[in-house]
Image: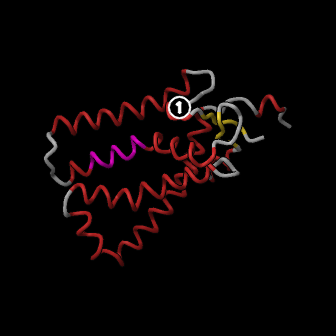
Amino acid sequence: MESRNEKLKNVSLGTRIVAFLWDYVMILGYLLLLFVLSFFARPLLIPLFTANSMSAEITGFLLITLPVYLYFSISEGRKSHATWGKRKMGIVVMGVDGRSIGLRRSLVRSAIKFAPWELSHFTIWHIVIPSNFPDYLINILLLTVYGLVFINLVSPLMNKNKQTVYDILAQTVVRYNE
């Protein structure tokens, strides 16, 4: 049986990635559901995704990003302090003070966490559906996405609490569940 000190230790990046991969199973299930439903809603969806890059971005945000963002925010901001994947791995999100982060801080944490994801969607829509954005700006946005993802991946390796940038900004940590 684990001692209290072992449970309070910081969670490794590998454990966090595995937890996210478990959550990605949920996300893929949701995307599969959207794919099936899209066959029935195709006449309604096609104009939303082809009219212009902004319409496509907003539609994609409402159908994909927002539900995923709310899944993480609500799951980590409520009593369990964890998504399904985190629960499977026995880890939780808490404030640096060891207390619950609540929904408000969880919403902020998830917004920062998924900013690179949404920026990549925004950029891709401007590649797929031509816009007035110059090529150099699209390239800068893509480099920014890769840079943010890299920083989020290496930041837990560079501090004693193994916090990502979004954890640092939201003043949260991921720990083993007590």
Q: Does residue 10 appear left or right of residue 31 in this picture?
A: right
Task: List x then y, in percent, for residue 77.
Answer: 62, 49
Residue indicated by mark 1: 164
**Residue at x-position 49% and y-position 27%:** 154
Task: List x then y, in percent, for residue 113.
Answer: 48, 41
Q: Does residue 121 appear left or right of residue 161 in this picture?
A: left
Q: Residue furthest front?
A: 104
Task: List x then y, in percent, for residue 74.
Answer: 58, 53
Please state which of residues 73 and 138 is positioned toward the viewer in this rendering. 73
**Residue at x-position 67% and y-position 30%:** 10
**Residue at x-position 40% and y-position 33%:** 148
In the rendered image, which quarter contains the N terminus?
top right
Determine whether the residue tagged by mark 1 lies in a helix, strand or loop: loop
In the rendered image, which quarter contains the C terminus?
top right
Q: Does the magenta stretch mainly form a helix, a strand or a loop?
A: helix
Q: Is residue 169 above or below residue 48?
A: above
Residue 117 is covered by the magenta coloring:
yes
Q: Is residue 115 above or below residue 162?
A: below
Q: How many C-alpha atoms fall within 10 Å of the one at disc 1: few (<14), some, or many (≥20)? A: many
**Residue at x-position 33% and y-position 61%:** 59
Residue 80 is covered by the magenta coloring:
no
Tell me which segment is drawn in magenta. 115-124
Task: List x then y, in percent, for residue 117.
Answer: 39, 45
